[in-house]
Image (cartoon, helix red, strand yellow):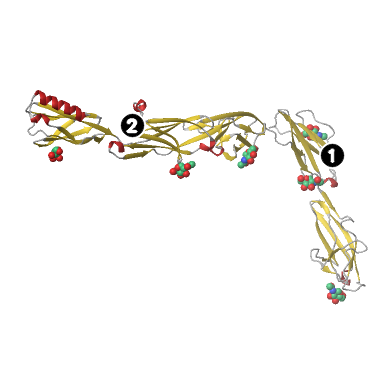
Amino acid sequence: MKTLLFGVWALLALILCPGVPEELFEVSVWPNQALVEFGQSLVVNCSTTCPDPGPSGIETFLKKTQVGKGPQWKEFLLEDVTENSILQCFFSCAGIQKDTSLGITVYQPPKQVILELQPPWVAVDEPFTVKCHVPSVAPLESLTLALLQGNQELHRKNFMSLAVASQRAEVIISVRAQKENDRCNFSCHAELDLSLQGGRLFQGSSPIKIVRIFEFSQSPHIWVSSLLEVGMAETVSCEVARVFPAKEVMFHMFLEDQELSSFLSWEGDTAWANATIRAMEAGDQELSCLASLGPMEQKTRKLVHSYSFPPPILELKESYPLAGTNINVTCSGNVLTSPSPTLRLQGAPDLPAPGEPAWLLLTAREEDDGRNFSCEASLEVQGQRLMKTTVIQLHVLYKPRLEESSCPGKQTWLEGMEYTLACVPKGNPAPALVCTWNGVVFDLEVPQKATQNHTGTYCCTATNQLGSVSKDIAVIVQGNLCCPAARPRMETPQGFGILIQA
Ligand SMILES: *[C@@H]1O[C@H](CO)[C@@H](O)[C@H](O)[C@H]1NC(C)=O
Ligand SMILES: *[C@@H]1O[C@H](CO)[C@@H](O)[C@H](O)[C@H]1NC(C)=O
Ligand SMILES: *[C@@H]1O[C@H](CO)[C@@H](O)[C@H](O)[C@H]1NC(C)=O
Ligand SMILES: *[C@@H]1O[C@H](CO)[C@@H](O)[C@H](O)[C@H]1NC(C)=O
Ligand SMILES: *[C@@H]1O[C@H](CO)[C@@H](O)[C@H](O)[C@H]1NC(C)=O
Ligand SMILES: *[C@@H]1O[C@H](CO)[C@@H](O)[C@H](O)[C@H]1NC(C)=O
């Protein structure tokens, strides 16, 4: 078409100015299509077929320098090409000027590909946006952006259509958050395909970005007994249910202003923090639990009541009374208990008035040695009845006794068997026992092999700080009439000795 027009025009010129062959000249430019990277330079050769050209040059707003010259050409260096433009190359020949143009296309490879995920933490079922943009990429018509989740392509956009050509090099999509998306890798891939313009394919990718998905709709719940005893360790647990990811929940627990050190655990969609608390004084205290996950924070408070209730004090006026003396067993509430507890002393006839001690008067008998007395205190705290019990053991001091039941006066031994003298004295403090035989102290520890020689009367004396008592023990050794190898019987007919089996 161009050539046709030119032909017509040239013919016209010939008709108007016959005999001037120079007018059939041509002007051309090299290269005939220019693709220049942003900011780079370009060499242009402008030439003509006119044998003797007149004024010539190029017309451009770019910074130009003539770098070469021939009779029919001029070469220019164009520097700092930053915009698409059209350059005119002109030559005049015999007073006629002709020109030709060169389109310069500037391109910029996708050096930087930026991916943004908003918000960084997304609640389950809420939407989040995945946005990719490429600053300073050109030409936009040759660009394609692809959004990827892992290796899978989520969305692809090109900028071919003129309607969007004026847009920015960006793509935005909205995705609904699902638990499976947590920590998913998102990336953006950009391609600038200049093959149609005589260039090559440029590619660029964004760094990987991950999205965090969470679920945290329920407030934490504090598990603690509503009553705490002062000084006693108690386990407190703060629980968050229906939470995701449960293992990432962070907890802070406080008793009033003091932070508790807690132990975290999780299972399925539930997370816990357990801590040990110890109330230092009676009264109401606030226990609080702050749970956080990603951008979310939830706080729960609970009032706990602490009480002081030490066990009742059970006393004997005399710690070690002598048998026969009167003793006063007294039970009183601990002064640290508030209000005064109700006291019940085992064996005491009636309940004391509030605040008064419970007491019991008795005459200590020997049989009472080792007897236990117990006192139970009860207290009502916040509608709950609490109990504490104290037990005390009575020790009655009495003189030694050698009773027939534990120290028989007649003991029969079988010849050949081993025996020790059977005699256990009673008394408090525990008496020492010494037995003599023919004026010689008889060893009570080492078993004796019974011989006829052991027959006789032994004299045993039990002694403690309160006095002493003696008893004669007659030992009879019976000849072993049965076969000597026969198993001995455990018991002797009269009284009993202690038989040691070989
Ligand atoms: C410029 O183009 C002309 C015509 O094609 C050619 O003769 C000349 O050598 C070229 N100049 C350079 C420096 O290549
Ligand atoms: C995400 O990318 C990292 C690094 O390339 C890789 O180690 C990880 O396995 C990927 N995660 C998923 C869920 O694809
Ligand atoms: C924490 O307390 C909860 C509730 O009392 C209990 O189920 C859980 O086992 C405790 N965890 C640990 C590690 O003690
Ligand atoms: C026993 O002791 C209590 C408390 O000290 C006292 O009130 C009470 O009178 C005493 N009883 C006797 C009989 O001494
Ligand atoms: C008294 O209490 C003590 C210690 O609790 C116990 O060892 C003892 O057997 C009790 N005595 C009686 C007679 O119950
Ligand atoms: C028993 O008495 C006899 C004679 O009197 C004596 O020889 C023997 O050594 C005595 N045996 C013991 C164990 O005393």
Q: Which residue is mark 1?
A: 362
Question: To which residue does mark 2 refer?
Answer: 141
Residue 171, quarter of the rendered image: top left
Is residue 278 found left or right of 140 in the rendered image? right
Q: Does mark 2's beta carbon lie closer than 8 Å to ligand 1?
A: no
Q: Circle 2: is it few (<14), some (14-19), or many (20+) Cα within 10 Å?
A: some
Is 276 on the left or on the right of 116, as rendered?
Answer: right
Q: Position of residue 137 (x, y in %)?
A: 32, 33
In the image, residue 495 lies at what x, y percent? 91, 61
Q: Closer to the observer: label 1 or label 2?
A: 2
- Residue 445 is labelled as none
The front one of 468 and 146 is 146
The three-letter amino acid code for the residue at tag 1 is Leu
* Residue at screen point 79% across, 63% down: 445
Q: Quadrant of ligand 1?
A: top left
Give the farthest residue toward the top.
16
Q: Quadrant of the N terminus?
A: top left
Residue 197 image position (x, y, % from top left): 28, 36
The location of residue 46, given as percent across then percent down, is 15, 34
Instruction: Give SS at disc 2.
Output: helix
At mark 1, the secondary structure is strand
Within 10 Å of disc 1 (Cα), the crowding (few <14, some 14-19, many 20+) is few
Image mark count: 2
Residue 291 in sight:
no
Residue 43, picture quadrant: top left
| Amino acid type assigned to the residue bearing label 2 in the image | Glu
Quick check: 267 left or right of 135?
right
- Residue 26 falls left or right of residue 140: left
Seen from the viewer's position, the closer of residues 57 and 450 is 57
